[in-house]
Image (cartoon, rainbow, N blue to C red):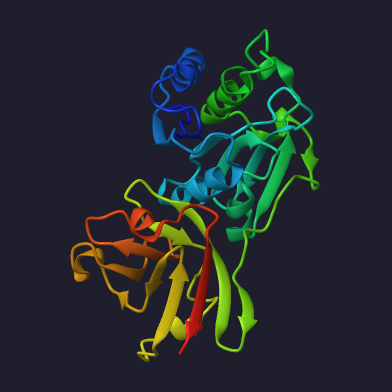
């Protein structure tokens, strides 16, 4: 039996356009036996950090050797490079714009190649749709077992950025930020238990979190533990502190969204 690797999509192409479908068609034309799973095609348009968060939260739940295609590419047609990365047990095909930064942050074994072997591309290559003409065919060939070394030389100057971290503002006080508001209106902050362990150690310390027009003084174990419409903090499944409401959008209650400042004070 020939080698087959699962392929996933993480893109900002949306659900109403043809882009993701065209990419799948290219993959199936090269590898009719391919299996493709969507992580999400609803990354915020042009938002590299949102794409980085999406792939970082999902990639490791897939089988070893899965090929993750990550296309959030506002620089398409410009000087940014297409890359094929091996990080941990997985392959990633993406633009070299930092969208894999949070994956690289989590993995110790990383190899990144500048994809220059154009005979693997779909021809002619559009200046505006490298997802179809570059990333999809490269992923298809990788899924069939083509060795990574055949796509281009290894590079070390690939783009990566550090996600914003909470900063100490005063003794027992921190400034943080909302990384995103999900479709349920949960405000996902950049705070993890490693950043402010005193919040999560179970000692029952009192605190105040302010974001937008809301002040939060409860850390609850689940969404259902809050009263309907009550705003509270919770440690979400992605490992970040979230500001949430039970069956209500916390973003609306707080009047806050991505980029809003979050202040934490232990009292």
Residue 200 seen anywhere in this rendered image of the structure: no
If the image is split into quadrants, where does the C terminus sit?
A: bottom left
150 w.r.t. 175: above or below: above
Residue 229 seen anywhere in this rendered image of the structure: yes
Residue drawn at the location 53% of the way across and 46% of the way down: 50
Coordinates of residue 150 in the picture (x, y in percent): 71, 29
Residue drawn at the location 28% of the way across and 73% of the way down: 221
On the rendered structure, is 147 left or right of 194? right
103 w.r.t. 205: above or below: above
On the rendered structure, is 264 left or right of 246? right
Coordinates of residue 181 in the picture (x, y in percent): 43, 51
The number of discs equals: 0
On the rendered structure, is 183 left or right of 155? left
Residue drawn at the location 20% of the way across and 71% of the way down: 225
- The quarter of the picture where residue 249 lies is bottom left
Give the camera-side residue of 81 and 209: 209
- Name the outermost residue toward the top: 124
- The quarter of the picture where residue 242 lies is bottom left
245 w.r.t. 249: above or below: below
If the image is split into quadrants, where does the N terminus sit?
A: top left
Coordinates of residue 214 in the picture (x, y in percent): 39, 67
Residue drawn at the location 57% of the way across and 30% of the way down: 142
Give the camera-side residue of 232 and 131: 232
Give the camera-side residue of 71 and 224: 224
Coordinates of residue 184 in the picture (x, y in percent): 32, 50
């Amino acid at each position: 039996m020939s080698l087959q690797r699962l392929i996933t999509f993480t893109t900002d192409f949306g659900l109403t356009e043809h882009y993701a479908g065209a990419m799948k068609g290219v993959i199936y034309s090269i590898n009719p036996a391919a299996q493709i799973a969507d992580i999400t095609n609803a990354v915020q348009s042009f938002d590299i950090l949102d794409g980085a968060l999406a792939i970082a939260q999902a990639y490791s739940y897939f089988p070893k050797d899965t090929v993750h295609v990550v296309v959030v590419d506002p620089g398409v047609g410009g000087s940014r490079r297409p890359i094929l990365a091996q990080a941990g047990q997985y392959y990633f095909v993406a633009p070299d714009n930092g969208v894999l930064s949070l994956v690289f942050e989590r993995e110790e074994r990383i190899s990144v190649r500048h994809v220059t072997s154009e005979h693997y591309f779909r021809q002619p290559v559009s200046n505006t749709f490298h997802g179809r003409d570059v990333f999809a065919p490269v992923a298809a060939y990788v899924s069939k077992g083509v060795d990574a070394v055949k796509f281009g030389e290894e590079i070390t100057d690939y783009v990566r950025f550090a996600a914003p971290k909470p900063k100490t503002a005063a003794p027992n006080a921190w400034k943080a930020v909302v990384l995103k508001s999900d479709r349920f209106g949960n405000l996902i902050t950049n705070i993890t238990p490693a950043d402010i362990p005193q919040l999560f150690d179970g000692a029952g310390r009192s605190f105040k979190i302010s974001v937008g027009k809301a002040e939060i003084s409860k850390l609850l174990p689940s969404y259902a533990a809050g009263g309907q419409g009550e705003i509270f903090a919770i440690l979400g499944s992605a490992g970040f502190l979230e500001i949430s409401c039970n069956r209500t959008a916390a973003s609306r209650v707080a009047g806050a969204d991505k980029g809003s400042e979050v202040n934490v004070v232990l009292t």
